[in-house]
Image (cartoon, grey):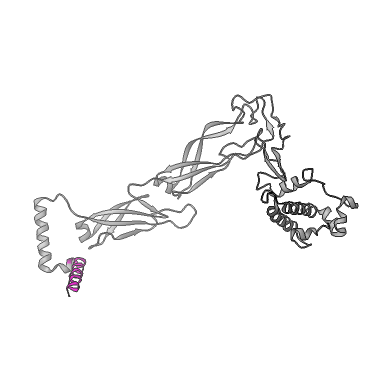
Amino acid sequence: MAKRDFYEVLGVEKGASDKEIKKAYRRMAMKFHPDRNPDDKEAEENFKEVNEAFEILSDDQKRAAYDQYGHAGVDPNMGGMGGTGGFGGAGGFGDVFGDVFGDIFGGGGHSRSSVQRGADLRYQLELSLEEAVKGTTKKIKIPSLVGCKSCDGTGAKKGTSPVTCSTCGGVGQVRMQQGFFSVQQTCPDCHGTGKMIKDPCRECHGEGRVQEYKTLSVKIPAGVDTGDRIRLAGEGEAGVNGGPAGDLYVQVSVVDHPIFQRDGKHLYCEVPITFVDAALGGELEVPTLDGRVKLKIPKETQTGKLFRLRDKGVTPVRGGSRGDLMCRVVVETPVHLTERQKELMQELKETFVAEGEHRQSPKKTSFFEGVKKFFDDMSS
């Protein structure tokens, strides 16, 4: 039976790129794979045909011979370059299929490096609002895996060295053949490192790393806020087999302040004022992070009014203008009145009634007029 054109088998044009050929092979191989088509002889034959086509077209030298001479250029029985003659030998289906699908089924034709970067660490650091706004330096103590000094991080007893794994030959992976399906897996004996330790170090028990506590000095820049991170390069866990250390990320958390609340670069605070100060006006001392300042309260100030103190907020850590301090005044109702004070308050109330409350309490008057209109509309 005459063989079909290899480009036709994969469904690509003759000038297809290597990437297009590999993509087409992946699609066709998955379609006709015996595991997906059990007891289907036609699918099995198609799968062999697809594999043969890819084996030729994925090799530049074989593809050139095929493009020039056709099947005769690659058929060993006709004097051509020839294929591998099977599905398990060197350069055969096992290698080709493993190379294309290795990332899906547990590894390709590449050995796994035994050198690994250490893990990153995170440290939660609590700061006061003053420390966050002005910046500071903090000393922190963290547990971390560091390279074992006794064995210099090899995991082997001093004076000895790790040996090449006899199971995988130092590659770190082994090939498992299941019918037409070839899969590379991590070596079960060396766990992918390619090395075996016959005489482990007593300090680290063959791990190459030991846990220690270390004290670090962390410089906190002015303006940081909850959620900001400070990266300390190389202060994470030690790498494996001489690999680079990971990083330490210091996560900032600013604790609640008894006076101020922060919103970005602005600060907010509540300032209680007396009934007299609200009515007649006055001058108060209010706190800021830079010290006390005078705040002038105009007469007839209502509760909830915001006063802005410019440039008394926070300078953002990433730059920009300094924020403001927003003071919200809250009129406090007098409590624990003496008998004389009660008498005076009653006299004041009578003067309000005599002159008409709408003058001194316009909001109250407007509110109750609205209530009256609401009930009148309901009854009409």
**Count of numbered badges drawn on the protein:** 0
Which quadrant, please, contains the N terminus? bottom right
Instruction: Relative to 6, say whether 362 is above or below.
Output: below
Q: What residue do we see at 82% from left, 46% from top?
A: 85
Residue 314 in the figure: left or right of residue 160 = left
Residue 112 in the figure: left or right of residue 265 = right
Q: Residue lying farthest right?
A: 79
Residue segment shown in magenta: 360-380
Instruction: Relative to 40, say whether 164 is above or below.
Output: above
Residue 60, x across and y down, in percent = 81, 54
In front here: 30 or 147? 30
Instruction: Relative to 111, say whether 159 is above or below.
Output: above
In front here: 326 or 150? 150
Residue 264 falls in image quadrant:
bottom left
Instruction: Relative to 95, say whether 279 is above or below.
Output: below
In front here: 117 or 65? 65
Residue 368, x across and y down, in percent = 18, 67
Residue 286 in the figure: left or right of residue 63 = left
Q: Residue lying farthest bottom?
A: 380
The chief SS type of the magenta part is helix
Q: What residue do we see at 60% from left, 24% from top?
A: 202
Residue 206, x across and y down, in percent = 62, 28
Which quadrant, please, contains the C terminus? bottom left
Q: Is residue 362 magenta?
A: yes
Residue 63 in the figure: left or right of residue 337 = right
Residue 106 falls in image quadrant:
top right
In front here: 287 or 42? 42
Q: Does the magenta stretch include residue 244?
A: no
Residue 310, x across and y down, in percent = 38, 58
